[in-house]
Image (tube, rainbow, N blue to C red):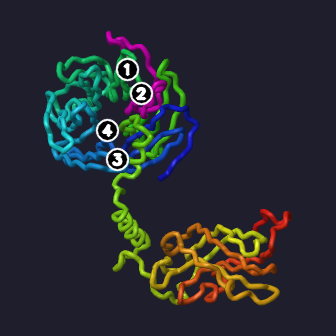
Amino acid sequence: MNSLKFNTPEITDGSLLISGTGTDTGGGICCLCDGKLEVLDRISTGGLTFFESRLARLLCAPINAGGEILIYDDRGVSQYLRIDELSDPHYMLWDGKHLVISTTGTNSLIWLALDGSVVRRLRFPGEHDSWHLNDLHVADGRLYACAFGRYAHYRDYKDHLSKANGFVFDIISGESVITGLYAPHSPRYFDAAWTVCDSLRNSVVQVDGQGRRQREVKLRSFTRGLAVTDDYLVVGESVQRVDEDSSATGSVAVVRRCDFGFVTRVEVPYREVSDIIVVPRSMVNGARIGFRTNSVRIKESDQLQMFRDVGIEPKRLWAVNERLAPEMCKVRLNARIPTTFICGSLSPVECTVQNLSDAFLSSELPFPVYLSCKWRNLHGPTPAAFAEGDRTRLPCMLPPGSSIPCRIELIAPSVEEEFELVITLVQEHVLWFDAVDPSNAWRATVKLLHERSGSDRGQMD
């Protein structure tokens, strides 16, 4: 996976998972830990929640296509749930017994058991997606949600976004705890106050128990997604959907919890940030592994994809090496070879091999291709036992046009002389690549000594 390093403070002892989406960039999940942003995958995602050593992930889906939830432990995906009753699902949380999901397309909440069964439904007044119900939060044992406004008709809120009708409310009593918001998201209760993304105003506001605004921080763009740590708030910044700058992507801003002072910003690869949560560092590995929990399945899938990447639909999935015709033996090698070797010693040499042919090269039977070497005494006969070096397997299948770093271990002859060292490939029982074409090898003149002299130490060819 891709990763980038940033100059960020030590935000949390855990890791931050950042989900997102984007109509042109696609979405996915990133991890921010120790100032490093790592892209874990590129699957568009809405809400995230961590509960009982597990991570639940709500995948984005069209309004009429149900929904999907992935549940991870530290070894990867442990459950897949397809919930057909969901409609444009946005967020979810764990209430101690069930996953509670905002099914925005039907202006509803659904309580879900971990076996995928729906155990409760709560629908609010109005037609489908009339309120734009979104994020959820539990405070003092009560469940709260936020919405764009109390409207009667389908997506009425789109014509009233400038009227500050957004609110955060108790889902049982219906009582609003914050009003006067513009397309709000991510309500959080901490420090005896409510804090919420006033999204359309590109800000985060804190409101006391009497509804008075105590603090506010203005950020770069549409605020959505809010994680709270001991010292910081981490806020998602999404590109507005009307923004025509195709190069723009979303970001997360780090803000001091004590005074809402801006600290730093980290770019993410998708246009819209959905959610941000704190998880233990061990949980990141599970998210990174995902569905790749079965090594046999993954090897087969990767092997098939390797063929398809070069336009081949194989009859046999696993490569079995046939005899190579001479015209298929075309490679380029590069190696860093010391100018001296100790007689009879074993020395590792780093090199790269590039496949210039149309054939796949691998070290599989019945005619494996190996990396090997030859020693030629420039001033006398070479002992037969050292005319050819040991064989080294290629680290993996080498498709046409690709290159790979390798390490070959060389056992130097015991004769103190000057030698030509030739590193090349050999197909066992068939041919040496340098015999087909001398350019299929890397050559160097080296000295073999019983003890390396001080002046020769560290010199490389």
Please name the predominant secondary structure of the magenta segment in the image.
strand
Instruction: Determine the CA span between mark 3 and mark 2.
Output: 23 Å
User: Depth-wise, is mark 3 or mark 1 nearer the camera?
Assistant: 1
Mark 2 and mark 4 lie on one chain; the one further toward the N terminus is: 4
Instruction: Determine the CA span between mark 2 and mark 4.
Output: 16 Å
- The vertical placement of 170 against 37, above or below, is above
Going by the numbered disc 1, the residue's amino acid type is: Phe
**Residue at x 56%, y 40% (from the top left corner):** 6
Which range is magenta? 207-236
Image quadrant where residue 309 sits? bottom left
User: Depth-wise, is mark 3 or mark 4 nearer the camera?
Assistant: 4
Q: From the image, tell me which residue sits under label 1.
A: 190
Instruction: Determine the CA span between mark 3 and mark 4.
Output: 10 Å
Q: From the image, tell me which residue sits under label 4.
A: 47
Mark 1 and mark 2 lie on one chain; the one further toward the N terminus is: 1
SS of the residue under disc 4: strand
SS of the residue under disc 1: strand
Instruction: Determine the CA span between mark 1 and mark 2.
Output: 9 Å
Position in image of residue 399 (x %, y %): 49, 73
Q: Could you say which disc has been placed on residue 44 in the image?
A: 3
Position in image of residue 117 (x %, y %): 15, 42
**Residue at x 34%, y 21% (from the top left corner):** 189
Q: Could you say which disc has been placed on residue 424 in the image?
A: none
SS of the residue under disc 2: strand
- Marks 2 and 3: in contact by CB < 8 Å? no
Mark 3 and mark 2 lie on one chain; the one further toward the N terminus is: 3
